[in-house]
Image: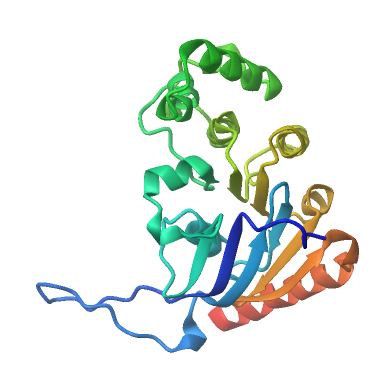
Amino acid sequence: MHTLKSAQIRAEQVSLAPKIFTVGKPHADQLSVPSSQYLLREISFEVFQGDRIALVGASGAGKTSLLRLLNRLSEPSSGMIYLDNRALNQIPAVQLRQQIVLVLQESKLLGMTVQQALEYPLTLRRIDKQRLQERLRYWIDRLRIPSEWLNRTELQLSVGQRQWVAIARALVAEPNVLLLDEPTASLDLGRSELLLGALAELKQTKGTAILMANHQLELAQQFCDRVLHLDQGRLRQDLAAQHVDWQTLRQMILQAEAHEAEEWD
């Protein structure tokens, strides 16, 4: 399907160990852990322009850890990640995060008003004032952000409203790659459907590649053209959406959730 195109992102044998530190020393040392306890183990995959990828798996499977690696909020313990054939660790973080934007579940507005937060990624890109205002107005209208929100801070917003503003801030940036960590967790059905439509538009008009971690397989099925299935830190499947047995996938995730619950008990 992608043989004529080069990958935007390429991960090669990426592993991530948990950070466990000693205490009571002037300079704490990180302890080594066995590979069986790694958060991610030997993950390899590619992301191409315009891909819409659902990242699925049980809680603790490594979905958030993988998204954080792709945005350099974490660094791999081994293996390499590339953006347009350039090693991620060779790209300055600010420059990288203008191309690869991550929306976490608990995103913050950093003391800004909604208006300031939406303007911020465009200001970083030094977009002129007229184009900035045009793009801002477009996405405010497209995402149906009420005008009365614009002067509010995050303390004046509900959890769902904060999540929606964080998503809007990312869409305003129109990045090359968009990473979403459970973006619909705090959204009602109407906003979830609105989000999927906006993501489809971003793919169509800008060629943005989108990776979305989501527990709601019904929404993932509507959204994706590829599925990456993580299980206990390993990539179990990388399939085109039309080849996914969704019922079997759901059962596999439920079984993994049950096993995890037994481990905790």
Residue 154, located in which quarter of the rendered image? top left
From this viewpoint, which residue is outermost toward the left?
A: 26
The quarter of the rendered structure image containing the N terminus is bottom right
Q: Nearer the viewer, residue 160 or 177?
A: 177
Q: Picture coordinates of residue 202 (x, y %)?
A: 70, 35
In the image, residue 190 above or below residue 177: above
Report the residue at 50% width, 27% height from top. Answer: 157
In the image, residue 87 above or below residue 20: above
In the image, residue 158 above or below residue 19: above
Q: Nearer the viewer, residue 99 or 260?
A: 99
Report the residue at 57% width, 19% height from top. Answer: 136
The quarter of the rendered structure image containing the C terminus is bottom right
Q: Picture coordinates of residue 20 (x, y %)?
A: 32, 76
Report the residue at 46% width, 44% height from top. Answer: 97
Would residue 249 be found to the left or right of residue 65 on screen? right
Q: Is residue 43 visible?
A: yes
Q: Picture coordinates of residue 218 (x, y %)?
A: 82, 53
Report the residue at 54% width, 59% height from top. Answer: 85
